[in-house]
Amino acid sequence: MYKKVKKYAQQNGLNIQEKEGIAFGQINGCFVLIQQDPAVPAKHTVMLWAKSGGIEPVPSVVNFLNECTSKFKYLQTASYSGSKIIAEFQGLGFKWGKNYVPCLDSFLKEITSYCRNNQLVISCEGCQSEQDVSLYQVDGVAHMFCSACYAQVAEDLQRVKQEKKAGGHGNVIGGIVGALLGALIGAVLWVLIYQLGYLSAIAGAVMVICALKGYEMLGGRLTKVGIVICCLVSVAMVLLAEQVSLGYVIYTELKDYYEITFFDAFRSVPDFMAAESEIMSAVVRDLIIGYVLMAIGAWGTIRQALKKGSGNIPARMVTTIDGTDIHNNGY
């Protein structure tokens, strides 16, 4: 968790679960959760659970949140589902490090005061019950459920897992063809960026993402086996893209002096590498850097694909919310 947000959470007595990237507890008498984006240090999601606690209609929460997005510099979006407020913060610009947490603090003070003044209360996201609610994380996303609604969620997750297991491996041959076609898109991007004198994580990530999508489109189902195949295809396609890039360099250097086609230059790449140690060293360096950048750029996508392919969606209870949290100390 971003150290300044972590310090802010500690100063306000919030519970911190750094491995899960969350801090939660009472701020101004309201239950608040702050979730750290796993990839961007200065990006956080703030969640509050709020609905009308009496016979009066719910006030215009959406209008209030729209005003907040105009008022608070780092508040990018804010939405209300009828029981849950979600606010997305991201630090941008040159001075965000100094002003980010004060902006987050000001918003939390204002939104919690708004909830208290309008007597909004915590409720289950599923059935709107105010009783027996607890905070859960499902696939890394925080939810407020009663025990009955969470039991239904857990049952649905188990059914999805069983369906994934029963689905078999799909059409592996079709999947391989799809992965090859998809990875070609990334290979083209790789060659284009290479001609500008760069190696990019974007090209490697696009290669893996397109390979996964191609496998799923023609293979019918993306399994763990399919994901491994897509990764191997992408690794091989980087080699091909590197050879194409080097072949184009050879072609542009020699075409004015010899009658040579691009395909002649492409076929000559191994000979040039064997004859010139500097070329061999440059290619090896490019491949190492390229594979590292590809791994960095594509890791998040691969991880999500593995999770989706296995059907194992993590779900856990974070904390119970007792009656005092909802009513007395609540909103």
Image: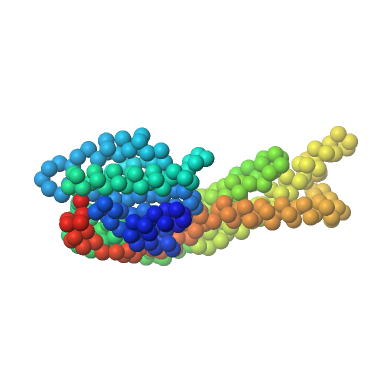
Q: Which quadrant of the view contains residue 71? A: top left
Q: Is residue 322 left or right of residue 251?
A: left
* Quarter occupied by the N terminus: bottom left
How many numbered circles does the render carry? 0
Q: Is residue 289 left or right of residue 37?
A: right
Q: Which residue is found at the position 61% from the left and 46% from the top?
A: 203
Q: Which residue is found at the position 86% from the left and 53% from the top?
A: 276
The answer to whether residue 146 of the structure is visible from this angle is: no
Query: From what the image shows, is residue 255 above or below residue 232?
Result: above
Q: Which residue is found at the position 29% from the left and 53% from the top?
A: 27
Give whichever of 314, 7 is nearer the camera.
Answer: 7
Q: Which quadrant of the view contains residue 259? A: top right
Q: Position of residue 34 (x, y in %)?
A: 36, 53
Q: Which residue is found at the position 44% from the left and 48% from the top?
A: 43
Q: Is residue 17 left or right of residue 60?
A: right
Most extreme residue toward the left, as rendered?
55
Q: Is residue 325 left or right of residue 239?
A: left
Q: Position of residue 310 (x, y in %)?
A: 44, 63
The answer to whether residue 10 of the structure is visible from this angle is: yes
- Scheme of image coloration: rainbow
Give whichever of 106, 132 is nearer the camera.
Answer: 106
Q: Position of residue 210 (x, y in %)?
A: 55, 48
